[in-house]
Amino acid sequence: MEDLFFEEQYEPDAETQDIVWRYESMVQQRSSAFLNEEEFEIIIEHYLRLNNLSKANEVADCASRTYPFSNEIKLRRAHTLLVRGDAYNAMQLLQALEYINVNDPDVLFLKARAYMQLGNRKEALRYFDKAVRESDDNAINYAYDAALELMDAQDYAAAIHYLKKSYDLEPSADELLNDMAFCYERLDDFKKSEELYMKFLRLKPFSDNTWYNLGTVYGRQKKYEEAIRAFEFAITANEENASAYFNLAMTFMYLQRYVEAIDVFKEFLTKEPETAFTFCLIGECYEELKNYEEAVIAYRNALGLKEDFAEAYYGLSMVYTALQQKEKAIESIIAALKIEPENPDYWCEYGKHLQEKGRNKEAIVAFQKTLEYNSYDTEAATQLAELKQTSASEEAMEKK
């Protein structure tokens, strides 16, 4: 069994295409053309690589009927079941296969995956260890595949264990440093993550993705100046790295360097033009700069791309409020609420407008809605208390 995990880009070679064509012809013509065990294995693997699980399962069923006593076909069948998420039935096959081939690393590895799907982490790790231990020539692949499986399950601490094992077996496999740095980042061990990203960059200084990842690590630690430099290096290495532009612009926003943020967001839009959210961020920057005309244009551009974008209507409401265009502000916040009726920020803004217009009963409802969706909103709580006190005083005066 050559691969348990497959590369993202897959192009079948001529031999594989010929074998698959023969199988498809056999099915269409309902003939009994001969395919040997190895050919069936190739066809199953082909469909798994294409993520065509129904086809892979169909071929596995056919192969099992043709070669009911073949252990290799049973192994492929178990693999197919696991990919489909049927760990229980896969485990039944693997238990029998392990009894026959006690130390087969392929069986051990798939059994580990089955245990992972069944939620038995302890047994999964035990079988991953056994698979690595029993595979003399291919231990690095099993260790790395175990790490990938654990990363997919978000068990980053265990994944690091197998990544280290892989790196010990093959110190020239530089990409393992990136994988380990990623895991440490997910564990919030930023110091170790930085160390490993920098170690990789000393070997491959033009890796834009690594510079980008390092920038995000700096950003999570609020080391914004270092993050800016890392994102700029990423862009220098690859001018098409859209994510680096976006995160660089966001970092400028955090630092309230709004002019620079706008410039970078505009660069980002040349890479990813259909992004309403980005226009909203540009609008927010212009709003902070009190350039309300450009802010309105940016929010309108966002709505042009996504007409039901509540955040853009909210932004417009804030701008119109600043411009003292109260009716437009109310219209915009109502439009936002129609799209997101459970957003506490929108209700609070609406409540403030109602209160200003003297519509206190409606304002009370709006602030109550705010607190219903966010009980920690102190502004809404304060406004609500004041309104209730005012209403109580007014009622008392009326009775007199």
Image (cartoon, rainbow, N blue to C red):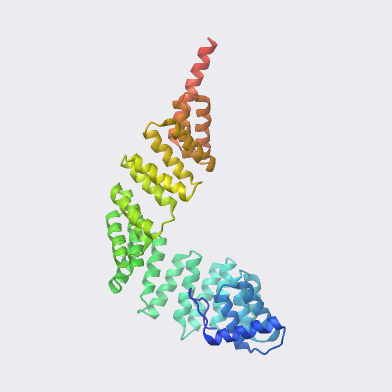
Q: Is residue 197 above or below residue 173?
A: above
Residue 103 percent across, percent down from the top left? 55, 84
- The quarter of the displayed image where residue 223 is located: bottom left
Q: Which residue is depicted at the point 53% across and 77% down?
A: 4
Front residue of this view, candidates 384 and 121 = 384
Q: Quadrant of the N terminus?
A: bottom right
Numbered label tally: 0
In the image, 256: left or right of 370?
left
Q: Position of residue 327 (x, y in %)?
A: 45, 31
* Viewer-proximal residue among 13 and 154: 13
> Closer to the camera, 69 or 319?
319
User: Can you tell which quarter of the image residue 224 is in?
Assistant: bottom left
Residue at x 58%, y 86% (from the top left corner)? 18
Any part of residue 257 in sight: no
Looking at the image, residue 36 sits to the left or right of residue 148; the answer is right
Q: Is residue 237 visible?
A: yes
Q: Is residue 244 left or right of residue 109?
A: left
Residue at the spot x=61%, y=68% of the render? Answer: 85
Name the image quarter holding residue 185: bottom left
Q: Nearer the viewer, residue 27 or 216?
A: 27
Q: Relative to residue 237, is residue 33 depicted above or below? A: below
Residue 106 location, x and y as percent? 55, 81
| Residue at the limit of the structure toward the top, as seen here | 400
Q: In the drawing, does residue 24 fall left or right of residue 192?
A: right
Q: Position of residue 156 (x, y in %)?
A: 45, 65
